[in-house]
Amino acid sequence: MLKKHGSVHRARDDDCVGHRKLCALPPSRHRGSGMSPLVVVESLVKEFPSSEGAARRAVDEVSFSVDEREIFGIVGESGSGKTTVARVLLHLTRPTSGRVTVAGIDPWNSTREERRRYHEVIQVVFQDPYSSMDPRMRVGAVVSEGLRSRRTHDRPVPTVTELLDLVGLPASYAGLYPHELSGGQRQRAAIARALAMGPQVLVADEPVSALDVSMRGQVLNLLTSLQVELGLTVIFISHDLGIVQQMCNRVAVMHLGRVVEMGNPVETFEHPTNSYTQQLVASVPRVPTS
């Protein structure tokens, strides 16, 4: 585990109290018996217009499924299409063709009520938490956004204090502004905001790449603990093969909009069969094996 960072401006990372009350959010109730996939992506295509006239295909016939309580990694260099896949899943970018479903709901072919439920089922933690927060809002108000939007009450609805405690932030931080937190603390607050909706699926899009090296281990450990305790399904997007190998149950390698290899991360990275995956692994000085 990486060593903790020392003091930072205003708030300090050593003020983080640890996620003591994981019971504040009971494990999510997933559909099915655990045998059917929770997330299904079928023949997904996304094209964007280009200056040359012909459409640029950012995602090209991508298919995969993610089981309940699985951490599924998507890796690839910049421009590989991994974030575009995430944006389609998050109902932010309409696909050109193909289909995505989460908990049996296709957000692009659904009723208003089904779409509302979809947005509760799947939530996201972005790479840069500061850009996704209103700097004029205090942390407590940022976290409570999800609570105000939540309409499904089949489980107890946590308070802002419980959510902050869940991610290792003192209750007093609810009164601070985002700029008064360190990068690691802002990412914890972003995770709390995502959990406020009571999601089954959490998309983590490069969640630690903008953090200091000393903070990355803490946030990754937090995500791992929350995934286990809350029964979350996580789609973990990263360019860091070492982190993906340690975090994920399975991984899909993307290149030029296509999935070129998929499987167990250890097997995929130690014995790659695709030439692009081989190049990707060779570019990394060392991929951890434990």
Image: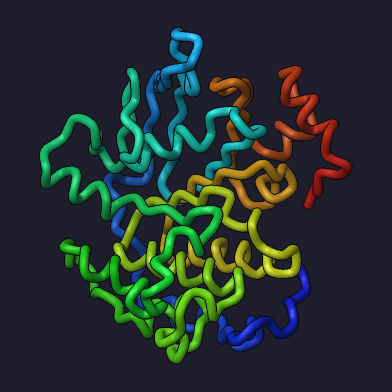
- The answer, for residue 239, to whether it is visible in the render is yes
Residue that protrudes farthest toward the right in the picture: 285
Q: Is residue 227 above or below residue 176?
A: above
Residue that protrudes farthest toward the bottom in the picture: 172
Residue that protrudes farthest toward the front in the picture: 51
- The answer, for residue 37, to whether it is visible in the render is no
| Residue that appears at 81% across and 49% down | 288
Q: Is residue 145 above or below residue 180?
A: above
State the residue in front, 149 or 69.
Answer: 149
Residue 150 x, y percent position in the rendering: 21, 64
Residue 283 shown left or right of residue 16 in the figure: right
Quadrant of residue 284 within the rendered picture: top right
| Residue that appears at 28% across and 43% down | 103
State the residue in front, 73 or 58.
Answer: 58
| Residue that appears at 37% across and 38% down | 89
Quadrant of residue 232 within the rendered picture: bottom left
Quadrant of residue 114 within the rendered picture: top left
Residue 242 x, y percent position in the rendering: 74, 47
Count of numbered tags: 0
Quarter of the image where the N terminus is located: bottom right
Residue 182 x, y percent position in the rendering: 60, 75
Q: Is residue 205 above or below residue 180?
A: above
Q: Is residue 41 above or below residue 169?
A: above
| Residue that appears at 53% across and 42% down | 72
Query: What colour scheme was applied to this rendering of the protein?
Result: rainbow
Residue 189 x, y percent position in the rendering: 47, 72
State the residue in front, 114 or 140.
Answer: 140
Residue 213 shown left or right of residue 129 in the figure: right
